[in-house]
Amino acid sequence: MLDDQFNKQRTTLVRDLASRADPFIKRRLLDLASRYEKGPPNTKPLPILSLNDQRTSDRSDSSDAD
């Protein structure tokens, strides 16, 4: 809930700045404001890998073949 309040306040601030900016900066600020309105992207957590799950490689170390 705190993040939602922050995003709303930040969106208002950025839109206010955009209303006073030149056209190039205005477009960028409005894009930023729309990102604040969307919120964080929905992502799924990465899988947890075990440290004991080591895969062997097919490479041979050429320095050992002397």
Image: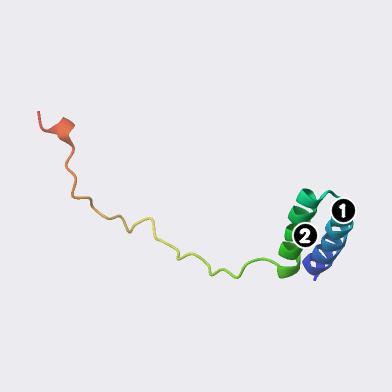
Q: What is the residue that sits farthest to the front in this orientation?
A: 23
Specify which label sits upstream in the sequence, 1 or 2.
1
15 is higher (above) or lower (below) than 22: below
Q: Residues within 10 Å of mark 2 (few under 14, many from 20)?
A: some
Image coords of residue 2 (percent x, y): 81, 67
Secondary structure under the numbered disc 2 in the rendered image: helix
Dot 2 amino acid type:
Leu
Image quarter (top left, top right, bottom left or bottom right) of the N terminus: bottom right
**Quadrant of the rendered image containing residue 51:** bottom left
Secondary structure under the numbered disc 1 in the rendered image: helix
Image coords of residue 57 (percent x, y): 22, 50
Q: Which residue is mark 1?
A: 17
Q: Residue at x 23, y 52 (%)?
A: 56
Q: What is the residue that sits farthest to the top in this orientation?
A: 66
Dot 1 amino acid type:
Leu
Q: Is residue 45 left or right of residue 36?
A: left
Image coords of residue 42 (percent x, y): 60, 70
Look at the numbered discs 1 and 2 and tell me whether their residues touch, using CB distance below 8 Å.
Answer: no
Image coords of residue 29 (percent x, y): 78, 55
Q: What is the residue that sits farthest to the left in this orientation?
A: 66
User: Mark 1 to mark 2: distance in Å?
Assistant: 9 Å
Q: Which residue is mark 2?
A: 30
Q: Nearer the viewer, residue 45 or 12?
A: 12
